[in-house]
Image (cartoon, grey):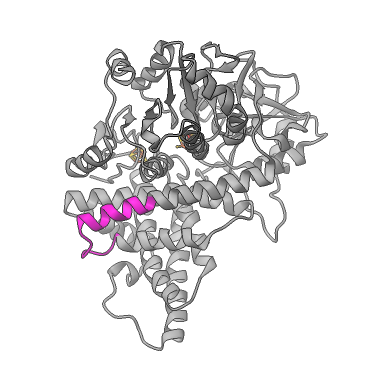
């Protein structure tokens, strides 16, 4: 076995990737990612102690969050990045150790190896990585809970990083992330204690999404109901994918008057809903679909593509020279736009110059799709929605948020949406929407039957909508609402969204297309028994179950 990774829905054979990732990650990259996580655990052990002594290390906080984000599925495939991060992490760990020693005057005793090990060469890194990966935890249930916790904080880190870029932060989130990472090295932690920590992770997940929501809406305004153009214009274009709105804004500013158009792809689609971006005349609309379709869509786009976060698919040679990564994203041999320094914007001039020399995008479709149903819009529609429910025009809401992926099984979601009775409404967020957002599902009392709140992090908006409905109907419990949860997951941001929903008391969530490989039978049983979590079967059977 040259690697072991089971963090996403595409884990090979539903158990784990052992030779090469389905995502394209090599065994070497997987090992370096394992070692980086181990390094972060060591730093966290010290950060927890330093915090208790009154020392908050902001550089460590930021390093941990960015490093976690870089190990999320489809974010970074560049071994040099991980090697550098491990080296930097080891130095950082020693710095915090020194600070702590100065402060307390006594060296720490009996520390876990994660806080002690050291190595310099790449060869030593690989050797060490073999001993500290996922399978180094022997007990299947402890391993499952440790990994569930790690994937939860990876997702949380992504949202914390997006908020940070916009100038929003909360040290309590860093404190929890580090406490969780350190806890995964503590052999004294029981199954029950780890379960409690996983639930606590959900609480901080809600806080992280609320923080990001505040950052996004304060900076760019509340998303508005928008008809998003999915056709093309005649100028050369730049396509922007991923979730980072700050990158998007800076690119829009720098392309003004350049004779180059800007389009969104995948999870950047919701940028179309923000008032702050609507003023840019060269912002055309959305091109294409969810991340996994990027091969053929980037090819047809003809111009440069900027990937601000996951999901990046290893680029084909035919368009690789047109791909630009930035932030935590990376791929060997692909152009990378450097981070901001001294508060100055990123420099996208290379992407813009590249675009000018390209032919305009090939048209792949025409028309428009509707979105912008985040919590503020929903608040404005609340009376109409409550009325529609009371009069029986809406019988049930289906939360179908989450992710899309390349597996054929995901056709289920298109068929499920198509076959839903006409008196039902889909609430969505994340790239899962592409499975049904171009179907003509019609309207109920002027309200579309597919209500898109935004990116996966905007699942927070869906929760606020559910809480508002609970209040409007005078209900005690969110589970009394006529809402069913049929959620599609793919990577670790979906894990934090799920844990956040569980923390808020949402029961009977169905998760597909398959349950996570990292849930051991016993851990899965805890989730089934306590929260009624279930999988999916076939469309007819599930429809009957949900509507029944
Ligand atoms: Fe999708 Fe990828 Fe947003 Fe994920 S583009 S799969 S859950 O990164 O983050 O929904
Ligand atoms: Fe496999 Fe997913 Fe891990 Fe990639 S991220 S190696 S596809 S489990």
Q: Position of residue 23 (x, y in %)?
A: 39, 35
Quadrant of the rendering where the C terminus is positioned = top left
Instruction: Report the side of 378 relative to 262 (left or right).
Output: left
Whether residue 236 is situated above or below residue 496 in the rendered picture: above
Residue 132 lies within the magenta run: no
Residue 538 vs residue 390, the one in the foreground = 390
> Does the magenta stretch mainly form a helix, a strand or a loop?
helix
Residue visible at 48% across and 56% down? 65
Instruction: Report the side of 426 relative to 274 (left or right).
Output: left
Q: Position of residue 279 (x, y in %)?
A: 78, 33
State which region is magenta: 184-201
Q: Splitting the image into four quadrants, where does ligand 2 fall?
A: top left
Whether residue 49 is situated above or below residue 302 in the rendered picture: below
Q: Position of residue 416 (x, y in %)?
A: 38, 16
| Residue 497 in view (yes/no) | yes
Quadrant of the rendering where the N terminus is positioned = top left
Q: Position of residue 79 (x, y in %)?
A: 44, 50
């Amino acid at each position: 076995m040259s690697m072991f990774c089971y963090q996403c829905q595409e884990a090979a054979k539903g158990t784990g990737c052992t030779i090469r990732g389905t995502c394209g990650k090599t065994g070497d990259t997987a090992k370096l990612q394992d070692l980086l996580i181990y390094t972060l655990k060591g730093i966290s052990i010290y950060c927890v102690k330093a915090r208790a002594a009154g020392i908050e290390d902001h550089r460590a906080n930021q390093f941990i969050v960015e490093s976690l984000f870089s190990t999320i599925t489809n974010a970074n495939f560049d071994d040099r990045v991980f090697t550098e991060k491990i080296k930097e992490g080891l130095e950082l760990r020693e710095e915090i150790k020194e600070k702590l020693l100065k402060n307390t005057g006594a060296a720490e005793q009996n520390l876990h190896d994660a806080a002690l090990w050291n190595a310099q060469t790449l060869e030593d890194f690989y050797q060490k990585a073999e001993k500290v990966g996922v399978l180094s935890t022997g007990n299947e249930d402890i391993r499952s809970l440790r990994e569930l916790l790690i994937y939860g904080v990876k997702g949380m880190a992504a949202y914390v990083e997006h908020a940070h870029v916009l100038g929003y932060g909360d040290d309590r989130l860093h404190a929890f992330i580090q406490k969780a990472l350190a806890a995964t090295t503590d052999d004294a932690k029981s199954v029950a204690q780890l379960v409690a920590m996983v639930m606590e992770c959900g609480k901080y997940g809600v806080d992280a999404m609320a923080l990001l929501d505040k950052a996004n809406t304060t900076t760019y305004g509340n998303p508005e109901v928008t008809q998003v153009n999915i056709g093309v214009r005649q100028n050369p274009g730049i396509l922007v994918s991923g979730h980072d709105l700050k990158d998007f804004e800076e690119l829009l500013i720098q392309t003004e008057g350049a004779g180059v158009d800007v389009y969104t792809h995948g999870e950047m689609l919701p940028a179309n809903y923000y008032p702050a971006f609507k003023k840019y005349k060269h912002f055309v609309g959305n091109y294409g679909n969810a991340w996994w379709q990027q091969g053929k869509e980037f090819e047809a786009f003809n111009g440069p593509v900027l990937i601000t976060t996951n999901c990046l698919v290893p680029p084909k040679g035919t368009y690789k020279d047109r791909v630009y990564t930035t932030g935590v994203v990376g791929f060997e041999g692909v152009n990378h736009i450097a981070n901001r320094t001294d508060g100055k914007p990123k420099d996208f001039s290379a992407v813009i110059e590249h675009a000018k020399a390209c032919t305009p995008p090939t048209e792949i479709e025409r028309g428009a799709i509707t979105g912008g149903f985040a919590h503020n819009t929903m608040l404005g529609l609340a009376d109409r929605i409550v009325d529609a429910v009371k009069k029986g025009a809406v019988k049930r809401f289906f939360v179908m948020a989450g992710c899309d992926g390349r597996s054929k099984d995901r056709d289920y979601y298109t068929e499920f949406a198509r076959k839903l009775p006409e008196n039902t409404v889909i609430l969505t967020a994340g790239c899962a929407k592409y499975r049904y957002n171009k179907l003509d599902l019609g309207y109920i009392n002027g309200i579309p039957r597919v209500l898109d709140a935004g990116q996966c992090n905007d699942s927070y908006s869906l929760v606020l909508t559910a809480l508002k409905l609970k209040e409007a109907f005078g209900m005690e419990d969110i589970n009394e609402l006529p809402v069913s949860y049929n959620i599609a997951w793919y990577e670790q941001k979906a894990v934090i969204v799920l844990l956040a929903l569980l923390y808020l008391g949402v029961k009977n969530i169905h998760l597909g297309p398959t349950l996570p490989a990292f849930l051991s039978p016993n851990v899965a049983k805890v989730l089934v028994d306590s929260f009624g979590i279930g999988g999916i079967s076939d469309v007819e059977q599930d429809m009957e179950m949900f509507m029944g």
